[in-house]
Amino acid sequence: MNYSSTAFHEQYPTYADTTELDKLRAIDFKLLDDTNEVYLDYTGGGLYSTSQVAAHTKILQNTLFGNPHSDNPSSIRATKIMEQARAAVLSFFDASPDDYCVIFTSNASGALRLVGEAYPFRLTGQFLQLIDNHNSVNGIREFARQAGSSISLIKSQRDDLQVRTEDVMTALRNHQKGSRLFAYPAQSNFSGVQHSLDWIALAQSEGWDVLLDAAAFVPTNKLSFSLIKPDFVCLSFYKMFGWPTGIGCLIAKRSSLPKLKRPWFSGGTVQALSVQGDWHIMANEYEAFEDGTVNYLNAPAITLGLDYLQKIGIETIHTRVMCLTDWVLMQLKTLRHSNGRPLIEIYGPLTTQNRGAVITLNFLTPGGQIVDERIVSREAKKYRISLRTGCFCNPGAAEIAFNLPPEKLAVGRSNSNGNGNGQSFDHYLALMELQSGNAIRISFGLASNFNDAKAFLEFAHTFRDTHFSTQDLPKRVHC
Ligand SMILES: Cc1ncc(COP(=O)(O)O)c(C=O)c1O
């Protein structure tokens, strides 16, 4: 095993165009090297740069901000920073303010819920989703179900977890007259597969409203609304630039927003209301969707974070992470136990075509069995590696990756009631007679470098011809 930096640079000459990121890492992400940590969970959460946090702190130290819903000096300043943040989001995604507006939420899930709960699902309505979706998209099916709408799934292919455009077209054409919502991720948070953005226009031409989950895509890929016109897009800012957590947004097409009918009103979302008269008039546009007081003190951090990415250039980040992803994929594929059997099983495409900077895999024993992901997690800690284990809130993609038959998966249904019942995830695995159904995910981002990728490959080597003890593994509580 000799992972030479020189060979890597020769193989990936475009990596040299991204050296600006090495300079930033030495200053803004110094903590990584100071603490000898290997961070490989950018799809879970981006890392924050110290300069961005310092600039944000400075603004708060030097300016007085009050609650934005008022007309006093501190409130006017807060309104201004909120408006600056909204404008920065639209500009970052090349979205015209005439066509799109930004609704701040607590995260991408909050944005998805806003759409799900307000979408006019009715008996004639339809909700169409990929099987490869985050649970916060899967959850929309419950709103559709309550309204009596039909719910359909488009499956991924077993071999590379991609979805065929023919299958999407067949599902899109199979529509009724009512309101119909098609939801899918621009990038799978399970496998890194990038689903075609061309489906947006195709779906709209068949009368579907499109909800694009861009949470895993936007940290390392350019999303330009000059090329695509989705009705609704959700994201979380901490995935893009680490700080602040607790704020995301829904970017909504102004012409599609009136379709959403909110099931309630709250402070900040009404223009006028009478308690005794029992009537209310909702506020206009995005204001009708931001419940209570928005996270206004974090607004400057959004503007700063987007500016930070803009200055680096999302293409530069993309180039770097794709070089690293390609290289790690190539190396992992060659790893073998001494008996010639593969050390790794990769889920998703084996090349960087149609995929982002995410690699999901399992380690295999010399006998070809999957190494329990809890062992991998335990071992990774010893090397100070932050990687992800589980199904990453995307059980649908995992069901396809592990070829789990629907009949087996249905067993859990009679034991579920939609409420917590004190049972662990292990209990459901046992019911479905599954050994694990989980995997290991690594993902690259803004501060990643060659050494991170190399550290993971060296870690992978420790599984060669090795049997690890399964004693004292913690219970799996969640999927
Ligand atoms: C593709 C995708 N969608 C939605 C989400 C939900 O994001 P959040 O937890 O910030 O609401 C995630 C989180 O990992 C994700 O990867």
Image (tube, helix red, strand yellow):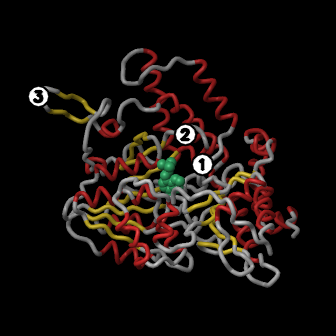
What residue do we see at 60% from left, 18% from top?
Answer: 62
- Secondary structure of the residue carrying tag 2 is loop
| Pointer 1 local density, CA inside 10 Å: few below 14, some 14–19, many at least 20 | many
Say which amino acid is labelled 2. Answer: Thr
Check whether the beta carbons of the residues at disc 1 and disc 2 lie within 8 A of each other: yes
Labels 3 and 1: the sequence-earlier one? 1
Cα distance between the residues tagged 3 and 2: 40 Å
Labels 3 and 2: the sequence-earlier one? 2
Mark 3, residue position: 277
Q: Quadrant of residue 266?
A: top left
Q: In this rendering, would 62 be left or right of 287?
A: right
Mark 2, residue position: 245
Observer-nearest of 420 and 440: 420
Cα distance between the residues tagged 3 and 1: 47 Å
Q: Quadrant of residue 17?
A: bottom right
| Residue 376, percent from left and from top | 70, 62
Most distant residue in the top direction: 72
Q: In this rendering, would 195 be left or right of 367?
A: left
- Visible residue check, residue 457: yes
Q: Is residue 353 above or below residue 320?
A: below
- Secondary structure of the residue carrying tag 1 is loop
- Secondary structure of the residue carrying tag 3 is loop
Labels 1 and 2: the sequence-earlier one? 1
Most distant residue in the front direction: 471
| Residue 82, percent from left and from top | 46, 31
Observer-nearest of 181 and 388: 388
| Residue 78, percent from left and from top | 46, 24
Q: Is residue 313 above or below residue 135?
A: above
Observer-nearest of 24 and 343: 343
Q: Is residue 249 above or below residue 423?
A: above
Mark 1, residue position: 45
